[in-house]
Every structure is written in structure tokens, then in C-alpha cells.
Amino acid sequence: MIDTSAFQGKTAKFYTLGCKLNFSETSTFARTLYNMGVREAKKDEQADICLINTCSVTEVADHKCRQAIHRMARQNPGSFIIVTGCYAQLESERVAKIDGVDLVLGSNEKADLIKYLSDAWNQPDMAHGEGEGRQSHLHTFHSVKTKDIKTFQPSCSRGNRTRYFLKVQDGCNYFCTYCTIPYARGFSRNPDIASLVRQAGEAAREGGREIVLTGVNIGDFGATTHERFIDLVRELDKVEGIQRFRISSLEPDLLDDDLIEYCARSRAFMPHFHIPLQSGSDEVLRLMHRRYDTALFAHKIRLIKEKMPDAFIGVDVMVGCRGEKPEYFDACYRFLESLPVTQLHVFPYSERPGTAALSIPYVVDDREKKRRAHQLLKLSDEKTHQFYSRYIGQEAEVLFEKAVRGKAMHGFTKNYIRVELSPLQVREELDNQIVKVRLGGFNFDKSALKAEII
């Protein structure tokens, strides 16, 4: 039994780096603490507890994590600081040496964050924020092998957003040559369909309208329960009250044609896909140990557009990875240029310690990486602009999100077009409501289409 009395009336701050999955997990931590009597600290208020949920997808991410930890410690002297997430898993000893850090939790331990926090917090010198002796209570997990990371932390939370994020899977079995995620999060694992349907039902009872399915490699759902992702989609589609589901990311080789067909005729799954490509060169895909080629990827894109002509398709692309010779990048550019995709999420390759990619001899310098990234980002802007332009003047249903006072209100159409409602039309009761609008031209920075309520 955890004694929560020491937490009553305390305050907390949260900082999340990285993916939607991390944001979902942080929201779950925040909700759990709230139920124990901890409120979120105001912007300029010092917090009693600080939690940093880290990312380690690139060297830049690692640097940002260290900066965030130092900043939290500096701005909240005496606060109890917890660090978890991928960077904490991969670099636990380095994180533990940062001044002010009290608790470092890896992928196995974060599911029991409250227990670890309670054990430490109820130590007299910790609970009262005394500096001397704090490091003697520092808990740092012992690094474990990928195969030994087995816990699954359920998460279905919206945090400060209108949309809920439902964690359906964790970990990855792929071991692509550039990636550390399997080492940070372990092998693929998931809860059963019934438990996820219950969580979605609870979100609906709380007033949720839209749920985003998150995970590390969600198309691999069923690895531990011997179920199928398409069966999860079918069951979630039946959940009353949830009007929109989105799938955060699906590997091309796990995006079944049957799933595309089902989404096209489903009640609540939106015409919106996010599909990692990483490279449009078959030679580079082989170096990456990806499990598909460009022909399969192109087939998936064209089938989506055949079944759902209005679908928004986002694509992850990595540039400047080891082995990406100029002719391979040129092939990648031409391939992406030829596809009816909507937006490119472009990432310069970052060297990751311990990855197989380090044995590939051809290295792209940083200047060339930036040039290639800029070229693809320009292509992305052109494709997104073309996609948005097709819908100017049309009617659409938009799920609006709460606006900052005096600012424009934003929301998304079914096919993920960002929409802006002018401050003159903003009403508090529009938050978390699906409203019919007429789409106008672009806003000032071309990040959204203006809209008028019909």
C-alpha cells in the first residue's frame, strides 16, 4: 500500500521530449500524481516534483535532454527530479551524475514510478527538500538487456490536448542499423484488445471525441497476445462516443492491404496515415536493414489514394545516413517527388553509439546533410500546399481545440488539414466539438486554412 499523504498539496512540473508515445506516457504520470493530490505547478511557480521524459533518437535529442534536466534543476531548486524515457534507459549512469537528479527510471521501472517516488519521497530529507544526503537516496536502475525489458505501462490520456493518445504497443523487434529504440524500449509487446477497448470506452465517457493510437511499432501489435492489429482496429471502431480514430505510424510492411480497405469504409478511422519510408533508395534501405523496398512502399501509397482519394499521408525520411551516396539521395528525391504524399518529416541522420550503421564506411558530412534536408523540406512544403489548396472553398467537419485567450482557435478536418478560426469567431463552447465549416484561403504563415462556421 502506497502512502500518498506526503503528496497532498504538492506541485509538479513535466517536460517531455520526443514522440507522441512519450507525451502519452507523461500525461498518464501527471494524471496519476493528480489523483494522489499533486497539482501541476503554474508557469512561474517552483515545483516540488519535476519529471523529465526523455528521447534519444538523435545526438541532438540527447543534448536537449541534458539541457532540460539542468534547466529544471536550476529553475526549481530543491525539487525532487525524476528522469525517465529512452535517454534515461540508454545513459542511466550519465543522467544520475547530473546535479539535482533524484530518480532515474528505465523502461522496466517507469511503470512503477509512483512506488519508486513514494519510497524515496517518504525519506525525511527528501520530502522536506533538504540538499544534504539527497544523493544517498538516488535510485538508478541497473542497465538491462533488450530481452529483459518486459513491462508494459498502459496509457490513455489527453494531457492539455483535445485528442486522447492510446498506447497500444511498446518496443520493437526490427533492429534497423541506425536505431537504438529496441535497446531503449525492448522487444515488441502489447496488452490485449479487450483492455484497450475498455480504455477507449473510458475516454469516451470522459468526453473524448478523438483517439490517436500510439506505440513504437504498432503494426506489430499482437506479438505478445497473438492477436492482430486489424482486429484491434475493428473492435475500436465499435466504441460508442469516439467519433475519430487516427493511427500514428505504421511500417510499410505491416500496413496490410486489408487494413487499408477496412479504414476506407470504417465508421471512425480517419483518412490519415503516417508511414515511415526512411529512404527512397533501395540500396540505402538494404543498408538500413529495412524490411521492404520502394516498390512495396509505392503500392501502399497508391492503394490508399485509390480507396481514400482525400487521405493525408505523412512520410518519415532520413537524409545523410551512412552509405547514402549522392546518386542514392537523388533517387530518393525523385521517388518522393513521384508519390501522392502530403507531407515529409525529414530527419538528418545522427550517429548512435552501438548501432550497426557505424560499420558502413561511406559518411555524409553535416553540411551535405543540411543541404539534402533543406531540399526535401522544400518538396514537402510544395506537396502540403498543393494538398491544402484542393480544399479551399469546400465544406469540412473540424474538431476544434481550446484557444489561448485572444488567439485564433485551431482544429483538424477528418483528413488532417489544420484549420484556423479567427479570434472574432472563437467561443469557449467550441472546444472539443466537431463543427461544420467552410474552408477559406491560407492563414498568414500558410500553416492552416482559414475557416468560417456554417
Image (cartoon, rainbow, N blue to C red):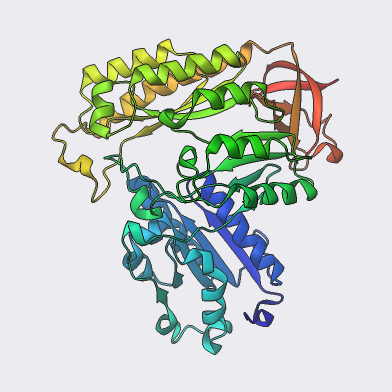
Q: Is residue 142 above or below residue 320?
A: below
* Point 38% across, 24% down: residue: 374
Tell which residue pokes out farthest to the bottom in this image. 124
Q: Position of residue 50 (x, y in %)?
A: 55, 66
Front residue of 25 and 220: 220
> Residue 328 vs residue 261: left or right?
left
To which quarter of the image does residue 296 belong? Answer: top left
Q: Quadrant of the C terminus?
A: top right
> Residue 64 vs residue 80: left or right?
left
Total numbered badges shown on the rendered structure: 0
Q: Position of residue 225 (x, y in %)?
A: 50, 50
Inspect this view and state whether residue 78 appears.
Answer: no
Front residue of 118 and 247: 247
> Residue 68 vs residue 330: left or right?
right
Q: Position of residue 448 (x, y in %)?
A: 65, 24
* Point 53% across, 68% down: residue: 113
Inspect this view and state whether residue 29 appears.
Answer: yes
* Point 31% across, 36% down: residue: 349
To which quarter of the image does residue 117 belong? Answer: bottom right
Q: Position of residue 283 (x, y in %)?
A: 23, 23
Q: Quadrant of the N terminus?
A: bottom right
